[in-house]
Image (spheres, grey):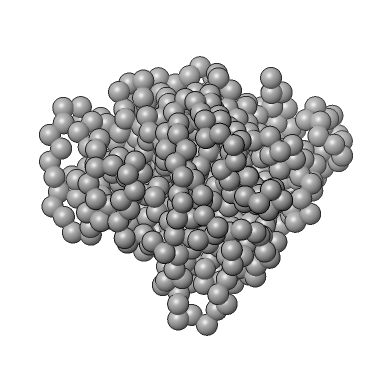
Amino acid sequence: MRTFDQPVSRRGLLTGAAAATLLGAAGTATATGRRDDRPNVVVILADDLGYGALGAYGQQVLSTPNLDRLAREGIAFADAHSGAPICAPSRCALLTGNHTGHTSVRDNSFTVTGIPPSFKPSDTTWAKALHDVGYATGAFGKWGFGPDHCYESVPQGFARGNPGGPDGSLLQDVGHESHPLQKGFDEFLGLVTHDQATDGYFPNYIWDGNRRRILPENANNAQKTYAPDLYVHRALDFIRRHRSRPFAVYLAPQLVHWPNLIPSTSPYDDKQWTTELKRYAAMYSRLDTYVGVVRRQLENLGLAHNTLLLFTSDNGSTVERLATGSGESSMYHRPSESYLGDKLWNIQGGLRSEKHALYEGGIRVPFIAWGPGIVRTSGKSQVADRAFASWDIFPTLTELAGARNPRGLDGHSLLGWITGHSTRPAQPLYWERQQVDMVFDVSPPGFAQAASIGDWKAIRYTVAGQDPHTPDARWEFELYDLAADRGETRNVAALHPDIRARMEHYMNTSHVDPT
């Protein structure tokens, strides 16, 4: 089995210097000598990583020293939120700068329709905005938008004798308008569909730009090449190759999403835990290691002082792994007791509920901003507890790069908070979630909306059905004072009819039917 510490030499998957050199812990900072001194950008997005998963956010069991260091040297925001409580709409919000009342992707539609969520031609990503002003842009890891008709999901693949694919012509879907290179990225290495990214820790093939590349060593569940390692190697190489100009990296390994597929259970080999718990814990530490080698690459190339690195998660932790989390095999999904780790290790950080829900456990996530020459060194507490969401990343990056925002963007720049040049007040926040049919969901299953204004948080559900235009009186409505009740245990809607009316008006005006 190839591990992260061994070089990846596959022609076309890693270009330039050997991966082993890129991963070296030691090295002398290299002067870039570049004329364009606009800051670089690195956005690292974890998958299903809950609010309490990192030491900087109170974690006592799992080891995350690299992320904890970034938090100490930068800002660990305490009231940051994902764009949605599930994957596809959350990533859409992060990439396009709009909340889910306005985005084109509002659900993991493939779970119901079998059709993968896709961007519209009119959707603009922050990568496109930065590309248009001269940035080199690279995406590495889980994409999640657009079709891949070569991929055979695990159940289909077993039925047809080819789990994981590829099936049919490798030219299918090449150049699709929803894929990364058509959405502003110069370079891409990863998996375009959510299903493949879920099953694809050891995929049979991977996308390199607009082409698929076969990984024959992974055929028949051989588990030789670990896809997240490839993503990180390519991201490090991208940074090296583009160090003489401004660049933007979007690194989205699918860790810590189930199943618990991991090359090693280090550093938990000696723990008196089940194998599944060790595998699950090791996913957090491997993700932390990835963050560490990216930081080290920036430092060794003399780029750290002029780079803004942001780390966050697409939503909270998930009970899904109870049914499908096992790391026994990538060929099929088995139940796993690793969900117990979320409880034993307090991955939710004391928040209510988890993925799929609009309670804080589903949408409040870690968010760390690091950059020695950019992030403020004093007064961090003035902004660390202010509420915002991942759609605010888009205008933050465009302000940093001197790029333009598309008209009507929902997001508001965080750059002043990060640098200390502005202390603008927090803005109201809005989320919506489509009707949920999954039996393990932890909140009412109807169409749901949530809003946050100051310390107040409102959530409401349609009693039945999926109509967002249901009259106000027919919704189940909940109101929480997060300053006094972060765990959302006391519904105080009956005590504050004025706040309820204000929240209902904001929700009604925030939703626009998709076209």
Circle count: 0
Q: For residue 447, which quarter of the picture?
A: top right
x then y, percent, for residue 424: 44, 33
Q: Is residue 158 visible?
A: yes
Q: For this view, does 195 lie left or right of residue 128?
A: right
Q: Which quarter of the image is occupied by the C terminus?
A: top right
Write the residue at 40% across / 19% down: 404
Compare residues 253 and 344 and report the one nearer the observer: 253
Q: Which quarter of the image is occupied by the N terminus?
A: bottom left
Q: For residue 139, which quarter of the picture?
A: top left
x then y, percent, for residue 443: 75, 51
Q: For this view, does 450 lie left or right of residue 258?
A: right
Write the residue at 69% across / 48% down: 160
Q: Is residue 39 visible?
A: no
x then y, percent, for residue 293: 31, 54
Q: Is residue 426 above or below residue 264?
A: above
Compare residues 511 and 313 and report the one nearer the observer: 313
Q: Is residue 279 above or below residue 355?
A: below
Write the residue at 80% across / 41% down: 446
Q: Is residue 175 above or below residue 148?
A: above
